[in-house]
Each structure stands twice: as C-alpha cells, then as structure tokens.
Image (cartoon, rainbow, N blue to C red):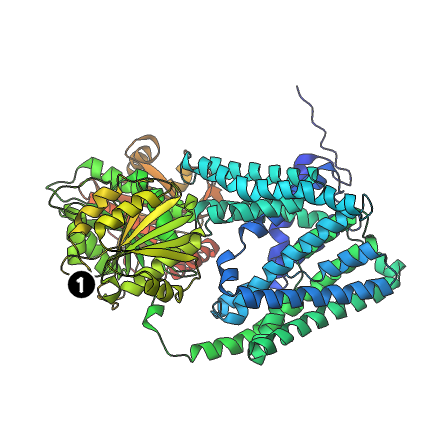
Amino acid sequence: MLATDFSLTLPVTNPVLIFALAMVVFLVAPLVFERLRIPGIIGLILAGLAVGPHGLGLLERGPVIDLLGTVGLVYLMFLAGVEMDRQGFRRNRSRSVVFGALTFALPLAGALAAALILGYELRTAVLLGAIFATQTLVAYPLVLRYGILRNEAVTVTVGATIITDVAVLLVLAVVAASTTGALDLGFWVGLLGPLSVVVVAVLVGLPVAARWFFRRTEAGAATEYLFVLASLFLAAFAAELAGVEPIIGAFLAGLALNPLIPGTGLLANRVRFVGEAVFIPFFLLSVGMLVDVGVFVSDLRAWTVMGVLLALALALKWVAAHVARRIFGYSVDEGQLMFGLSVSHAAATMAVTLVGYRIGLFDDLILNVVVLIILASCLVGPAVVSRAGRRVALLEERRPYEPSQAPQRVLVPLSNPTTAPALMDLALLVREARTDQPVYVLTVVPDTGGIAEEYVASAERMLSKAVTYAAGAGAGVQAVTRVDENFARGILRGILETRTSVVVIGWDGRTSRHWVFGSVLDRLLEQSTQQIVVAKLGHPLATTKRLVVMIPRGADHAAGFYPAVELVKRLAGRLDASLYLLTVGGAVEPYVSRIAQLKPDVPTAGRGMDGWGEALGALRELLRREDLVVVIGARPNTIAWHPALQRLPARLATLVPESFLMVYPPESREGSGVEPDDSALPAALARSRLAAELPGRSAHSALDALLERQYPLDVGRRRDILRVLLHSPRGAALEIRPGVLVVHARMDFLKEPQLYVGRSVQGVAVPGVERPAHLVFLLLSPTDQPAEHLAALADIARLMSDSGRVERLRAADSDAAMADALQMRAAPAPPM
C-alpha cells in the first residue's frame, strides 16, 4: 500500500499543494484588489510578496514556480503580439509614430541620465531608461466603458504603445546580448545574423505553416491551440539560440500569428483565457516572490532612487503627451487622456525588468523600486483617464446622431450542424466591435402534420452546438426557433421578430437553372430588405490574406452600398487582409478613393473590367488559395442587377479556393417591428418551481429536489421522470455556458411544459457533462409538443445570454431572491 506523508513544513514542497495554493492566490488576490480599485496585476505581485520567502514563507521560488513563471513571461509577450491592433496602428500610423517616438525617447533619456548620475553603469542605465519608456494600457477598460474608443487621441495612443514596446524589445535584445561581449563589429554580426534568420523564419515561415495547418484541421479544434503553443515555444527557443532573450521570439510569434487569430473567434478566446487564467498569473506570482521590501529599510538609498525615477517617469510621460497634443491640435482633455493611457507601467515593464534581473544588470534594489513604481503608475493612470475620459465622453455625446450608430443585430439561420462553427465564425467577424447585442441563431422546424423526430433532434443539436461554440468565443447567443412548413417564411418571421439588420446564411453550392441559389434563399432575397450575406466557405476564414471584391455597375447607387462595404472592410480588418477591387463596367479609381475613406484602414487596390466575361477571366488568373471572393450582389429588379449575377454563384463555387460571399446590401436602413422584450420569461416557469438550495452534488438528488416542488407527495412520478432524465435516450443534458446546465425531456403524461430552476452552491455533477453545474434548468414538455419544447430551450438560452442575470442567480440565497434575479412577476402555482 502506498504511504503518503501529509506532514506540512514551510516552505511547501508538495507540488500538488504548491499548485493548489497558487490557484487560491490567483482567485482571491485580483478580486480583493480590484474591489479597492487597484489593478489585479498589482494584487498578484503583492500576493507573491506575501506568500514568498520575504513574506510568510509559504512558498519558495523553486523549480516549479521558476518553470511556470518563465512560461508565463514568454506567454505574456506572445499575447502582446497577438493582441496588437495592426489595423488601428495603420489608421493613424504617422501620428502614432510621432507620439511613440516622444513617449519612448523622453523617458528613456531622462531615466538614463538619472541612472548615470545615481552611479549605475551604462548598460544598466540604458535598460533602466528603456523600461520606463514602456507603457501598458491599464486604463483601457475605462475607455471602453465611456464609449470613446474611436476618439483619435485614444487610437493614436494605442498605436504609440506598439512603437514603444517594439523599441524597448530591440533595446533589450542589444543590451542583453552585450553582456556576453564587447559591442564591436563581431558582436553586431554575431547578433544581427542569427537574429535576422529567426525574424524571417518566424514572420514569413510561421504564417505559411499555420495557414497550411489550419486548412487541414477542424475549425476551433483543440489541435489549433496546441499548434499555437508549439509555435510559440519553438520561436522562443529559436530566439534563445540566436543569442537574444526568448521573449523576443515569443513576441515575433505573436505578430506572425496575429492575422490568423481573429480577436472575435474561439481560438483567440482560448489563447487569452489560458494565458490570463494560468500562465501569466504564475509569472506575476514569481515576480512578487522576488520582491523584498526590507531593502527600503536596510538601504535608505532605495528611497532616493525610487523618488527620482518615479518623478521622472510621471513627468516625462506627461511632457510627451502634451507636446503631442499641441502638435496634433487636440484638446486639453484629450492630452490628459493620452497621458493617463500612456503613463501606466505593468506587464511589459515587469517582463523586461525580470530579464534584466536574471542577466545580472539589475539588483534587488532596482527590482523593488520598479515594483513600487508600477504600483504608483497603475494608480495614477486610471485616475487621470477617469477624470478626462468623462469630459471627452460628454463632448462625444453632444455630436449629432447618425443612423449608422443604431444597434446591429446579426441572425444566423442554421440547417446543417456541421457548418454551424464556420457560419458562427463569420457572424462574429462581421459583427460590430464591442456591441452588446447577441448573435441570434435561428432554426426552422417544419410543421408537416406531426413533426418528425429527426427534425427536432437536428434542431436541438444545432442550437446546442452554436450556443456552446459562441460561448467559447466569449460572445452572447440568443436561440430562436420557428415552426413553419415554409423555411423561407420561417426565416423571415425570425428576421422581423428580432429586428435583424444582417443575416448570415450558408449555401451548399447546389443550384438549378431557374434559381440563383435555390428556392429558400431566392425567396428570402426577394421578400426581405435586410443586408444578407450568403456564404460558401471552403477554407478556414482565419487563413485569408486577401479579399477580392467584385462590384457590379451601378452598385454604388444603391442606398445600402456603403453599409455593405463597411461590413466587407470590417471583415478584412478583423482578418488583417487586403482588398482587391474588380469593378465591372466602370473605372476602379473612384471606388478605391471612396472606399478608402471608410473605416477601418485596409490596403486597397484593384482594376476595372469592361464586362462580366472579362471580370471572370481576370478572377481565374488572380485567385490564390488564401483569397476570399466577395461579391457586392444585387437583388433582381434593382439598379445593379445583371443576368450574369444569377449564374455567378455557381461559377464561383468551382473556382479555387471554392470560398466566396455574396453580400446583398440592405434595401432600407430603417428597422421594422417592435423591439423584442429580452427580459421576458418563459411561460413554463413559475415561482413555485424555483429552488435556491439544491442538496448535495448528485444529479439524482438535485433533480429530485426540483421535481418535489411540483410533485411533493408523488414519489412514483418523480422516480419515473428521473429514470427518463438520467437513464433513457429521451433525456438529455446540455451545458449552455460554464456552470449552467439544462436537463430536458418530453414526457407522455404532461399537457403543458414545465420549467424548473435550481441553484447549487457545491455544484451538481451530471453524467456526460464535464463541469459541475451551479445553475440547473429542468425542462419537461409534452411528447406531442416538440415545437414548444424547442422554443423553451431557446428561451432559456436567451435568458442565460445575460451575464448579469447569471451572476444574480448564482448569488441568490433564497427562492424570492431567485425570482428577483429573474425579474419575475408573481405567478400562481400550477395545479398538482
């Protein structure tokens, strides 16, 4: 029998307990410090100080922490490259370069001079100056909250952050490499030669390899994330072989994969989630364990160093921001906004500091000074942005209203479960940034004299797959089910009821001589006025490098032309792809100049074609595997309609890469119908079926407690229902978001649907579901009402798309509190 020693000594050496303590710190520290309005990054560093060898001594910075901290440092710089806003930088590149140069050079020069005066050697002084030239957008969430993201001062500061981070990494590469030898010709050849090979291999070779790999794997599969991890650490190791720090290679890998990891997709969400939840916290924890505040007691010189460097870090960032403000003609508040965004030092500063400490250029005093300066700057930055941002936001609100600012709603009709991930990816890419609107997913169930079971099962699979996929990408989804024997009419009803503005729908490539796409899609185009995107996707969207856009003669005269072009440019911006225009029956130059005025900025070129025959010939010569064809379509009997458009989709389906979009502009910009009530509750839900305290972790006991609300004395009835739910193919369990479970079945004895909601503090474990559920929905419907059953499932998904409601439900400690969380009016209990 294996004996285990549970004796506890400090510091902890048991690897399982080390990991457990780290997880507790990662959970508690950010929550506590963010309640104090202090960034969570500071909380993790100070928590590392508290549990480390210079604090309580719970943990030592041994092999486990050292390994995971190094991984976190490398991952942090990779994430910086992945999340770099390349389109935003291009949009204001000249002003970003000017401000970036100012906010890099002034702090660098000032800190360098101060460090030399304080007696530090040149290399230490240079690196110390460089780290105070960095800037982290700690206050960026405030910009999002105030809705001033598009203010030019903000976008220029974001671009300048890219300049400073790249410049600091170059300084780090030179300074770190110089510790192994003199800065002579041999040094530069030995550094630049291998480094150039790594840069070319990563920035040129890695995207090619990634596109090849992504084309051959299932969209959103775990293998994609493993490929990203392998690429990251191979690039980091290659940089180390070239004689520079691994974080240089990691940053290059992030830049290389940036266009292939769209920020709205499932892969990007996985990359961010794992880094922010595990790897980066380990890095910050390991940094905190190095901090020794005793230095400030034993060495009074530390206060002098900190005071001088902190004053310079704040003052010179302020000077840089206000010099740039005067050059660009911004208001005083916008200058304050630039200062508040650029003054904070956090992740990149800490990363470079740790490298300097490891290679021996920084001592314990500098490490401790930098940590305290990070803390001070992270308090100053958000405070300044909060004050200036409010005033800028008030000015923005006084600007005239533009119809284009109305909420965009995207609807995705699904009929094939296998295409759901690709269509959801496309919907998330064309959706406007930072919208609070969910993606609506529509299924139409045919009402043909008794609905076939296979239709119902297929609809349930599609709803669950779409909801789960979008939740993994961090997007809200609202499921919509309509019963209609006519699929086109069912989709149209869904469009009107949700006030949809953009419809994203798939096409399988099959057509006939009398239809453009087929009866359903053609009727949808004929009877709708909304913007419709018909997609045939033969390759992963993330591998797209160029959008080849075909524009028919007269398309620019349609009322919805520019909204359609904005959607195409948004897609190109998210994919970091260029635009190549093919204009049919007109010169291309006017289109290029007018389209260039629309946001975002995307490299645009093209040529004009005399007719459709020439355009199709040019298309065959132009297309490459990394292209996506986009046609600005036209509905029949509109000004841009041409008979060639009827045959065009069938021809495009045979061309490499067999992927294209037909974008049909909206006929009208005005919505129709009544705003749907997103807070409406399912009719099957009654107050008597709420349970705030489900017992135990067993699915059987938890579900039985819910059923007892309806059948308190009928033990046999509860037993029969539980048998169906847990031990029969008729019962099913669906996790619609982490910790939220729907268990459902259709029962012979029921005459109307019943919906129960329960809350479990411990979490309910259900067979076949990976995570314990803290919120459990139990839905029972009559066997002969499959449509109502699907509609109730869609209602539950709609309710749970509201994160605020989910949190209120999880915090509710009584049935009454649950009712309040659901915004529920008193409802009479149904008869027993």
Does any portion of residue 272 appear in the rendered image? yes
On-image quarter of the N terminus: top right
**Residue 469 position in % (x across, y down):** 39, 44
- Kind of residue at disc 1: Ile
Report the residue that reaches farthest toward the top. 1
Determine whether 785 is above or below 381 in the image.
Answer: above
Location of residue 321 in the rendering, given as x and y in whole percent from the top left corner: 63, 72
Q: Is residue 67 left or right of residue 161?
A: right
Residue 188 left/right relative to 333: right
Q: Is 121 positioned to the left or the right of 524 in the image? A: right
Residues packed near mark 1 inside 10 Å, few (<14), some (14 to 19) or many (20 plus) = some
Q: In front here: 59 or 76? A: 76
**Residue beneath the point at 60% across and 50% down:** 27
Quick one: SS at disc 1? Answer: loop
Relative to 179, is 741 on the left or the right? left
Residue 46, how many percent across, how many down?
A: 71, 55
| Residue 716 position by quadrant | top left
**x and y percentages locating residue 825 in the rendered image:** 32, 63
Q: Residue at x 50, y 65 (%)?
A: 144
Q: Which residue is mark 1?
A: 639
